[in-house]
Amino acid sequence: MVRLIAIIVLIALAYVLVRYDTRENIQKGIIVVLCSAFAVYLVAVVVSELIR
């Protein structure tokens, strides 16, 4: 549940940064970081379920 809340907060942060016209390099960096963090989270969940 904590992970889900963290993901929602990060997505909201990305939305706010994109909406309020921050610099383009910062926007791209944040989106790349969020997508990669989400991918790592999904891999961790899949691996932990397969180990069980």
Image: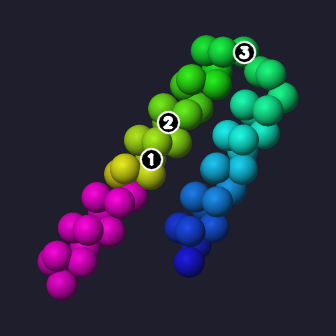
Disc 2 marks which residue?
33
Q: Is residue 50 magenta?
A: yes
Binning the other alpha carbons within 10 Å of mark 1 as few (below 14), some (14 to 19) or many (20 upward) gives some
Q: Residue at x 72, y 50 (%)?
A: 12
Q: Is residue 42 above or below residue 1?
A: above
Binning the other alpha carbons within 10 Å of mark 2 as few (below 14), some (14 to 19) or many (20 upward) gives some
Q: Residue at x 64, y 21 (%)?
A: 26
Where residue 23 sits in the image (x, y, percent)?
72, 15
Identify which amino acid the numbered label 1 is placed on: Ala
Identify which amino acid the numbered label 2 is placed on: Val
Helix, strand or loop status at disc 1: helix
Q: Quadrant of the N terminus?
A: bottom right
Q: Is residue 44 above or below residue 24?
A: below
Which residue appears farthest toward the right when viewing the image?
A: 20
Q: How many marks?
A: 3
Helix, strand or loop status at disc 2: helix
* Magenta stretch bounds: 41-52
Binning the other alpha carbons within 10 Å of mark 3 as few (below 14), some (14 to 19) or many (20 upward) gives few
Real-space Cα distance between discs 1 and 2? 6 Å
Mark sitting earlier along the chain (3/2): 3
Q: Quadrant of residue 6?
A: bottom right
Helix, strand or loop status at disc 3: loop
Q: With 41 as the anchor, is 34 left or right in this view?
A: right
Disc 3 marks which residue?
23
Which residue appears farthest toward the bottom when viewing the image?
A: 52
Identify which amino acid the numbered label 3 is placed on: Arg
Disc 1 marks which residue?
37
Mark sitting earlier along the chain (1/3): 3
Q: Residue at x 58, y 32 (%)?
A: 30
- Our reading of the magenta stretch's main secondary structure is helix
Q: Is residue 13 above or below residue 31?
A: below
Q: With 49 as the anchor, is 6 left or right in this view?
A: right
